Image (spheres, grey):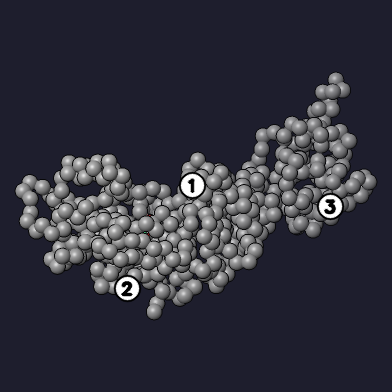
Amino acid sequence: MTVRTRFAPSPTGVLHLGSIRTALFCWLYARRHKGEFVLRIEDTDRERSTEENVMAILEGMEWLGLDADEGPFYQTQRFDRYREVINEWLADGRAYHCYCTREELDELRAKQMEAGEKVRYDGRWRDRPEPREGVDPVVRFRNPDDGEVVVDDQVRGRVVFQNSELDDLIIARSDGTPTYNFTVVVDDYDMQITHVIRGDDHLNNTPRQMNMIAALGAEPPVYAHLPMILGPDGAKLSKRHGAVDIREYHEEGYLPEAMLNYLVRLGWSHGDQEIFSIDEMIELFDIADVNQSASAFNPEKLRWINQQHILAMSTEELGERLVPFLGKAGLDPANGPLPSHVAEGFHERADTLLHMAASARYCYEDFEDVDPKSAKKHLRPVILEPLKVVRARLADVPHWGQTQIAEAVAAVAEDYELNLGKLGQPLRVAVTGGPVSPPIDVTLWLVGQERTLARLDKAVALIEERAAASAG
Ligand code: GLU
């Protein structure tokens, strides 16, 4: 049997972290078992589904590399098929028309509530074949009256539902449109889904869906209902905990592999390993290792995992990924060092690509003024002469390489009996405008010879001006 999983998002909201974790588990399970992964857009709620949300789903999946073997299928394009099944079921009694009016249902509900009973449809149109004038009927599925439905859930274990608790579900509204639980069943059946992996908010739908699958004469798929993702405060993860829309993480410069690594650990573990490559996830993932309890979203851990993936990536690759973020930071990648060189210099100190691009601003763009606090502390008259000398030596470096730069700086420090930091920090402030940057040889190398010299000239002039001002 070929394993077939599906991700079936409704485009009624943004593609959020919880949905992606579901998609990831479905995808991993299919890849692990050399199976197939199907993407199905459940867009039957026409009022709340938007084209923009559909695009966000497709783009998000593509960015994350969660490629589908089939689909995207759109439920709105399958209405004929749903109608066909409904007609078949109506013809042989697996479903029936119900002509109850809103008032009648309200009355039934009021009565049941008064009697302290569970509110449910009482089946009054089950055996009344004659239509009622002036009422557009709904179609209801004839649920079995008794017996139980056992969900052998791969995460939750055995969950038993009594048929007596389930009423006859509406499968088509009075305007003829099919309803969610029914379309899922027809689709899972037609698409030969073997494993349904989804959020545990759907667990209560499962016995109804299993009864309908049985009505189709098929065996139910294997179910795995994933526990919720909570916010750091223990409430269901939502916008107020920060970004839940995957696009925001993309824009901030998280790596897709880091997102997947972070999400796979929400509910799944393999010993105490934290960092997984995608290949490792595929090799190791198993539904049986999914946790039963909810897990909490932790943005700091996500940043940490992102940084680990940044560190593990080759600087060439990282440089390529950095290019769009330089653009986002308003920098022109052509007007400065190679992005792979920036990646080499900055990968240990940036936790996102956007952060890396922003930190490298002085490599691509001149700054107006040196940070005043750093200038006061490090650009002082005592350093004037060493700075002039180092400027002259750097001007003579024939090949602008890290070793040559390091040698020039070390030689001047030695001549003046300065420890390296005593010269390095003023140099850094002069060339970057602030007190933090990669090691000084790397920093100057990235800034480039021409810019380094020009900025040193400016710093020298600044120190001289200040000295003159205080002397006068
Ligand atoms: N469309 C449903 C949702 O977005 C998922 C249905 C399912 O996985 O069975 O919640």
Identify the residue at image location x=86%, y=38%.
383
How far apart marks 2 and 3 lie (CA) works out to: 76 Å
Identify the residue at image location x=37%, y=50%.
53
Identify the residue at image location x=62%, y=52%.
301
C-beta proximity under 8 Å, tags 2 and 1: no
Expressed as whole percent of the image width and height from the top left, the position of residue 249 reads: 52, 50
**Amino acid on which the number 2 mark rests in the picture:** Glu
Q: Nearer the viewer, mark 2 or mark 3?
A: 2
Expressed as whole percent of the image width and height from the top left, the position of residue 179 reads: 26, 55
- Disc 2: residue Cβ within 8 A of ligand 1's nearest atom: no
For residue 5, side relative to residue 117 (left or right): right
Quadrant position of the C terminus in the picture:
top right
For residue 158, side relative to residue 428 (left or right): left
Residue at image mark 3: 408
Kind of element beneath mark 3: helix
Sequence-wise, the earlier of marks 2 and 3 is: 2
Badge number at residue 236: 1
Sequence-wise, the earlier of marks 3 and 1 is: 1
Kind of element beneath mark 1: loop
How far apart marks 2 and 1 lie (CA) works out to: 33 Å
**Amino acid on which the number 3 mark rests in the picture:** Ala
**Amino acid on which the number 1 mark rests in the picture:** Lys
